[in-house]
Amino acid sequence: MLRVLMVGWCAILLAACSPTFDWRPVAFGQCGAAGVLPDTPQTQTRPVTFEDRTLNLTMRSARAGGVLFALGSAELPSGWAADAAARRRLARWAVDALYRNAGAEPPGPDTDPEQRFSFQGRGPQGPVRVEAQVRVTSSEWLEAVVIAGPDDHARAPVNDFWLSLRWPDGAGTAVPGASPR
């Protein structure tokens, strides 16, 4: 009887540890940004044109169920280290692009482009919830993104992703709509 009870308890414990979210640490960018992804990351680099400059954006992503988690980075041109205005325009442009790509209206110009945000948009299979944060440092553009259908998002441990995130300045990520640090 004890053996049957132990086997049953082990089965319950194994069912509770869903292999769908097998979190793995992932470094991204060149200056110490890190987070976790729920499976072995796929890596893709693509050229992105911003203000007549081409930046090579590398995205590390993994799907778990119906949820896409991604961490991205691109090195900035060397002259941008001293150009805070260009870096701010890039951050705003990156946020606006996330909204436009999901068929949503970008936020107004008074919104801080480096605060974590979320919105409802449309994907190929219907409505999606997008959560993201963009950071542009003196040397790189970084972003973290979660995209999921509303039901998938509600069931997924999305906060585990956000709690793991560390930016180059050592800061974590605040909740959407939180006051700037």
Image (spheres, helix red, strand yellow):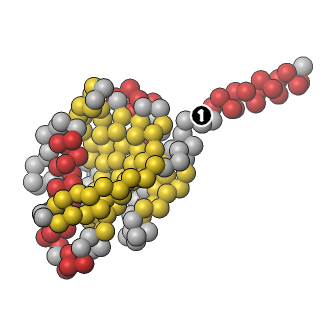
Instruction: Please identify the quadrant where the C terminus is shown.
Output: bottom left
- Place of residue 164 in the rendered image (x, y in percent of width and height, measured from the top left): 47, 54
Q: Is residue 15 left or right of residue 113?
A: right
Seen from the viewer's position, the closer of residues 57 and 64 is: 57
Structural crowding at the residue carrying mark 1, measured as other residues with C-alpha within 10 Å and reported as few (<14), some (14–19) or many (≥20): few
Q: Residue at x 35, y 56 (%)?
A: 45
- Place of residue 18 in the rendered image (x, y in percent of width and height, measured from the top left): 59, 34
Q: Residue furthest left?
A: 109
Q: Which residue is mark 1?
A: 18
- Place of residue 75 in the rendered image (x, y in percent of width and height, measured from the top left): 31, 68
Seen from the viewer's position, the closer of residues 105 and 16 is: 105
Name above or below for residue 25 compared with residue 5.
below
Q: Is residue 1 left or right of residue 43?
A: right
Name above or below for residue 41 compared with residue 18.
below
Q: Residue at x 46, y 56 (%)?
A: 35
In the rendered structure, which amino acid carries the disc numbered 1? Ser
Seen from the viewer's position, the closer of residues 108 and 95 is: 95
Q: Is residue 6 left or right of residue 161?
A: right
SS type, badge 1:
loop
Name above or below for residue 28 compared with residue 10.
below
> Is residue 88 something one can see in this rendering?
no
Q: Residue at x 10, y 49 (%)?
A: 108
